[in-house]
Image (tube, rainbow, N blue to C red):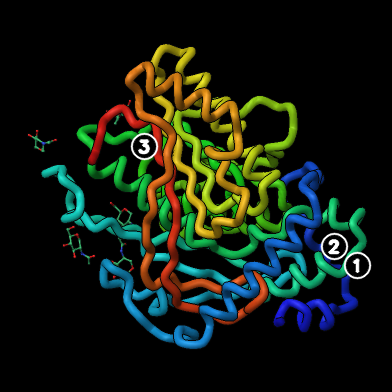
Amino acid sequence: MIFFIFASLVTVFTAHWVIAFTSNACPNRAKFTAGTKDYIHSIRWTNKYLSRKLEPHIFASRDFRDGTSAMDFERRRATLGRVPIISRTIPIGINVSAEPKENCTKKTLNVTIWEMERPSEIIQTWWSVEESERSVMGDPFGVVMWPGSILASKELMKHHYCSRQSQIENATVLVLGAGTGVEAQTAGLLGARKVIATDINQMALGLLKYAIDNHGDSNYSMSSIVECRYFDVYSDQKLPHCDILVAADVLYNSDLAKRIGLRVHELVSYALSENGAHSGIIITDSQKFHGTDFLLELKELRELNELLLKSGLDQLQWEDRKLQNVVGSGVLLDGDLVYDADVRLLSWGWTTKTR
Ligand SMILES: *[C@@H]1O[C@H](CO)[C@@H](O)[C@H](O)[C@H]1NC(C)=O
Ligand SMILES: *[C@@H]1O[C@H](CO)[C@@H](O)[C@H](O)[C@H]1NC(C)=O
Ligand SMILES: *[C@@H]1O[C@H](CO)[C@@H](O)[C@H](O)[C@H]1NC(C)=O
Ligand SMILES: *[C@@H]1O[C@H](CO)[C@@H](O)[C@H](O)[C@H]1NC(C)=O
Ligand SMILES: *[C@@H]1O[C@H](CO)[C@@H](O)[C@H](O)[C@H]1NC(C)=O
């Protein structure tokens, strides 16, 4: 299995990578609280998944639904500290003919993020160090784009463009596990008043901040809207105040998934206690690991759903979606792949029904 080959290729430049990763951007050190075993399971699974997907698709050049190929965009290189990074522009579109609202016109956005150029190195390094050092490095997966961030962005666009009144404009949007910041930037571009983009991985926060500071459109000040902030979902800290919560592809293991589920519970309970205060929630998951369906795993959410049902309100539930021709790298493969992804979506709490 490829996994074991990677594990045996582990390199010895650990020390300078650890320093490079932890000296960036946001001040607090990552507190890595999830079980290592879960992550090893995730890496192994991802590897298997990608190696299966790899053959027919690698380096293929196919078009997105909206006709813009993500392969056509120039990729720029830079360094962050000593780490080589590379830009990726992602065209995000909504198929408006699939939406019933008459005023929903064809829309696309181009979002430029920065990724680690060789993500496999961080994973190999992470794998090779002592557990105590891992806790300093933090969760390593946010250094590349994941397909769930595209679906979350499309969902934000839908509630902006296909709603009687934009649900994103002027809202405060909180992103948990923001990673490279696809959905955080989308929210900003759609007119959010404030976007609080959080992660625990210092490298991801560094990449995010770099993208925001280097946002190309001089007429739009991304850096005054999107704030990059360290936030640990495992902490006792309350969620920062928000109108909309987004967590895209952060359900890597059951422990973390439950924690995100409890945060969803926290927000829904708050929305209910505020007598119907506007609170939108978007959760996506393209990995679907066993045991990461928090709606099944958490008694609190099952009870909450019963309450919502009794009150005639929308329940929290997953929908299955398909994303076609996603272009991205994996965490253990540094080249680009083009692949279709099955992504589940939980979208709740919108004041205007759009479907
Ligand atoms: C857009 O949605 C319409 C209506 O559901 C569908 O017929 C059409 O094939 C979709 N277009 C694309 C490019 O997916
Ligand atoms: C996105 O970029 C493509 C290619 O440069 C361009 O044709 C398209 O107009 C851009 N879309 C938007 C909404 O800026
Ligand atoms: C669509 O826009 C027109 C003009 O901007 C407005 O009169 C109409 O009410 C809108 N329709 C809906 C469904 O929002
Ligand atoms: C956003 O705020 C501006 C300025 O206060 C206001 O004009 C606009 O209508 C608001 N948009 C929405 C969708 O509430
Ligand atoms: C910024 O706005 C000005 C005036 O509206 C326009 O001429 C210019 O092309 C815009 N720049 C960008 C990068 O969109």
Above/below status of 146 relative to 185? below
The amino acid type, in three-letter code, at marker 3 is: Ile
* Earlier sequence position, callout 1 versus callout 3: 1
> Which residue shows up at 55% across the image and 59% down it?
287
Q: Are marks 1 and 2 in contact (CB under 8 Å)?
A: yes
* Residue 18, numbered circle: 2
User: How many neighbours does mark 2 have within 10 angstroms: few (below 14), some (14-19), or many (20 or more)?
Assistant: some
Please report the residue visible at 44 percent of the width from the left and 66 percent of the height from the top. Answer: 341
Establish if 51 lies above or below 203. below
For residue 236, the mark is: none
Q: Position of residue 338 (x, y in %)?
A: 45, 77
Q: Crowding near pointer 3: few (<14 within 10 Å), some, many (20+)?
A: many
Q: In the rendering, at what x and y percent does residue 340 appear?
A: 41, 70
The answer for how far apart the CA atoms under marks 2 and 3 are is 37 Å
Secondary structure under tag 1 reads helix
Instruction: Please identify the quarter of the rendering in which residue 48 is found.
Output: bottom right
Q: Quadrant of the C terminus?
A: top left
Left or right of 105? Residue 10 is right
The disc label shown at residue 15, or none:
1
